[in-house]
Image: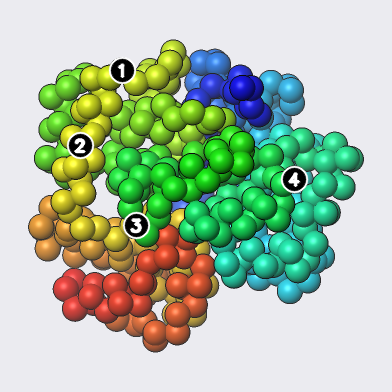
């Protein structure tokens, strides 16, 4: 059965982690990455109102340099982020149009649905507003991104059959993760015949450098393939997939992704067996499921570097090297963020965390171990 986006190649350019020079996005390197991506036949670009500098950068690197009908552009509205009125939310859409200069969006997403965020879109009447924008031609396809439970996903799909697609976090580490429930969410989307855009296939970069025992399994099977390639291929092998977003940060990552995804047609039985072995090995190691989306840090009144703290804790879990983990934590001061011990236990961070992490408890542990 045909579905939306089946003709789109299964690698999408996620624009959340673009290359930087200092604190600014490196537009010239981004242009090179865009050129490589399009020349290889890929067309799907994904940004968001909340991705600082991303929409402006893709205007310069893509939209001003290529015909508008030669690519697909997706962006997102976060009505739950500092929006007091319907007009505040709609202003995000208008700002995205202005920043990108795209004229219209091929795929427009209501960003990070999941209680209590879902209610904001309903309260502001955003679904009906978005359908009006579709009639006007400013939105071609309407969907939403989601980081919550399969039960809540079903509630949304029942309430809003107008959603044409769903963007889900899917990777081999989270497939059976009881906190993320990637498999169950994927199966729920397919139950309602919604095609899926996959985000976080490499789990914020963590699966590019998994524990040695996991990496050894992949290298033994395919010595010349990158470890990250296994994570992207695993996600792209699923049925009903529009594309798999990879948040590439340099031309080397782009070249690697293109090398194995340009002619990707699916994983072989032998590759699937290798993946099963790797997942079993990874499951033995407890880690904090943070993808560095930074939503928590944006609402933290103390400006604590929460994602970087969890990155340091995961380095400790994966390597056992306390000094290396402390070295990761020292980046907080360089970037003007506070240490985990500054946490006042307000809980604002946990209200926006897509991964449902017990952030406060983990910050206490991090302060005890690493400060």
The residues tagged by marks 4 and 2 sit, at their Cα atoms, a distance apart of: 38 Å
In the visual, does 222 lie left or right of 105? left
**Pointer 2 or 1: first along the chain:** 1
Q: Which residue is mark 2?
A: 278
Of residues 365 and 329, the one drawn nearer to the viewer in this rendering? 365
Q: Which residue is mark 3?
A: 178
Give neighbour class at mark 2: few <14, some 14-19, many 20+ (Cα, 10 Å).
many
Q: Residue at point 78% right, 66% down?
A: 124
Q: Residue at point 88% right, 40% down?
A: 135
The residues tagged by marks 2 and 1 sit, at their Cα atoms, a distance apart of: 15 Å
In the visual, does 90 lie left or right of 37? right
Q: Which residue is mark 4?
A: 162
Residue 194 is drawn in which quadrant? top right
Give neighbour class at mark 1: few <14, some 14-19, many 20+ (Cα, 10 Å).
few
Residue 268, labelled with which disc? 1
Of residues 87 and 21, the one drawn nearer to the viewer in this rendering? 87
Split into 4 quadrants, where in the image is the C terminus?
Answer: bottom left
- Residue farthest along the top direction in this orientation: 263
In the visual, does 132 lie left or right of 50? right
Q: Answer yes or no: do the residues labelled 2 and 3 have beta carbons within 8 Å? A: no
Give the foreground label among 4 and 2. 4
């Amino acid at each position: 059965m045909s579905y939306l986006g089946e003709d789109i190649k299964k690698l999408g350019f996620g624009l959340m982690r673009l290359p930087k020079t200092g604190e600014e996005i490196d537009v010239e390197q981004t242009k090179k990455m865009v050129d490589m991506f399009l020349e290889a036949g890929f067309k799907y670009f994904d940004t968001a109102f909340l991705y600082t500098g991303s929409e402006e950068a893709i205007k310069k690197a893509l939209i001003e340099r290529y015909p508008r009908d030669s690519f697909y552009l997706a962006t997102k509205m976060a009505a739950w982020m500092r929006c007091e009125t319907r007009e505040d939310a709609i202003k995000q859409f208008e700002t995205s149009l202005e920043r990108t200069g795209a004229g219209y969006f091929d795929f427009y997403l209501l960003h990070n649905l999941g209680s209590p965020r879902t209610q904001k879109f309903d309260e502001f009447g955003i679904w009906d507003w978005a359908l009006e924008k579709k009639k006007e031609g400013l939105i071609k396809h309407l969907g939403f991104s989601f980081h919550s439970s399969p039960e809540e996903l079903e509630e949304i799909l029942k309430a809003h059959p107008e959603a044409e697609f769903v963007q889900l976090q899917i990777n081999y580490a989270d497939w059976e993760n009881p906190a993320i429930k990637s498999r169950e969410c994927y199966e729920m989307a397919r139950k309602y015949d919604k095609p899926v855009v996959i985000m976080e296939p490499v789990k914020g970069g963590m699966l590019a450098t998994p524990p040695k025992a996991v990496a050894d399994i992949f290298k033994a099977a395919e010595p010349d393939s990158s470890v990250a390639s296994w994570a992207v291929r695993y996600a792209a092998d699923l049925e009903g997939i529009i594309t798999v977003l990879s948040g590439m940060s340099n031309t080397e990552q782009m070249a690697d992704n293109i090398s194995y995804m340009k002619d990707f047609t699916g994983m072989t039985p032998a590759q699937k067996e290798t993946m099963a072995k790797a997942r079993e090995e990874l499951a033995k190691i407890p880690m904090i499921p943070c993808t560095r989306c930074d939503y928590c840090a944006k609402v933290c009144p103390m400006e604590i570097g929460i994602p970087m703290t969890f990155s340091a804790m995961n380095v400790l879990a994966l390597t056992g090297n306390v000094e290396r983990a402390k070295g990761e934590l020292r980046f907080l001061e360089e970037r003007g963020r506070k240490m985990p011990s500054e946490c006042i236990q307000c809980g604002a961070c946990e209200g926006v965390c897509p991964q449902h992490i017990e952030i406060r408890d983990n910050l206490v542990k991090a302060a005890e171990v690493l400060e």
